[in-house]
Every structure is written in C-alpha cells, then in structure tokens.
Image (spheres, grey):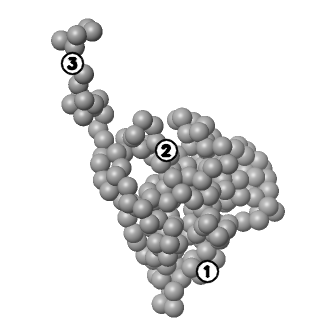
Amino acid sequence: MNGPDAAAVPLGDYSMNATLLSFSTTVAYLEVDFAMARNAAPVDGKGAAAAAAGAAVNGASAVGIAGPGRGYGVPLAIGNIWSRTGKWCGNVTAHDSWLGLQGANHTGEEKLEFIAVSTASERGGSHVFDIQAFRDNMDEDEIVDFVNVLWVERVGGVCYRRGLGHVVQRVWDAVARDRVEILLG
C-alpha cells in the first residue's frame, strides 16, 4: 500500500540492492601522511622530492607517489600510518592516486578509520614493509607480526573501502581496543 495511509516499514525489511558483508572486528583511528611516503616506507623531504623528480624525468605524473614494483607505473597515494605517540607503525595504499576520487573526503587533517581484516607475520625479510621498517619492528627471531587493515569511510551506516594497509601488531593491539559491527559495501 502506498500513500499517506501506508504503514512505515522498518529499514531491515527492505531488500538491499547491493551485496553487503557483515562482520565484527576491531577498529582504530590513526593519523596518515600521504605526502611523505614512497614504496610504503618513511622517507624524509629530500627522498620525497627525489621520488617526484624521478617520476617527472620518466614522464610519469607526480600526482601521488608510486613505489618501485607497486601499481605497475600507475601513481598511487601511498601513506605512512602513525601511532598516537607519533611513531611510524605501518602503511596504507589508497585506491586512487587522487584522494577525492570515489567520494573519499580525506583532507589530511583528521585521523582515518581502520578496521582489522586479518593478521600475518613475516620472517627474515618483508614483502609488506621496506627493509629498514622491517628491521625496526622485528622481534629477536627476526619476525614481524602485523595486521592487514582496511581504511574505511562510513556513508549511511555502511563502510566503504578506501584503501588497504598494514599495521605493526603490537601497535594495533595497543590502540584498537574497541570491537565494532561492520556492514561493508
């Protein structure tokens, strides 16, 4: 029945037009610096300038910073994730080189919402972190434990993936104390 006399139907009774994934996980709000990263590792201003200059010399756009072997020559917005104490603790790759694409409204001023999707570890070397970041975070057995995370943005109660990253496990355990219910679109 339609019209002003129609009874209100709860939102849950409507069928969704998209496939959504529902799960429970931990959440953390962390700072990200997209302007100072190359190959998902911390670099100084000189290194960032060299990366941009190298991209310009090779005819690539300097929008975003593309690390060697990542993205097959496509500029990516790769950033460093920082702990609450200001220590480097991971990296994130946004889906788009320009962060305004697909509706992401990251301005660089706010902390980003990350949710855990899995855990992993690497021994003796890394495909996730550069060698210096790996050495700085490995234990006595040369193992680095980390959490695979999604950078998500919420729209109307649904989380949308904006990027994929990795956070050192011991930092994640310290900052991600809240469990949340996620509806991923």
- Which label sits on residue 7? 3
Query: Badge 3: how crowded within 10 Å, few (<14), some, or many (20+)?
Result: few
Query: Badge 1: how crowded within 10 Å, few (<14), some, or many (20+)?
Result: few
CA separation in Å, label 3 and label 2: 33 Å
Residue 178 percent coordinates (x, y): 42, 62
Quarter of the image where the C terminus is located = top left
- 8 relative position to 133: left or right: left
Is residue 127 in view from this perspective? no
Mark 1 or mark 2: whose residue is earlier in sequence: 1
Instruction: Please identify the quarter of the rendering in which residue 133 is found.
Output: bottom right
Secondary structure found at label 1? helix
Residue 42 percent coordinates (x, y): 68, 66
- 127 relative position to 133: left or right: left
Q: Are marks 1 and 3 in contact (CB under 8 Å)?
A: no
131 lies above or below 46: below
- 18 relative position to 164: left or right: left
Mark 1 or mark 3: whose residue is earlier in sequence: 3
- Which label sits on residue 153? 2
- Hey, what amino acid is under mark 2? Glu
Q: Is 110 in front, or is 5?
A: 5
63 lies above or below 67: above
Residue furthest to the left: 1
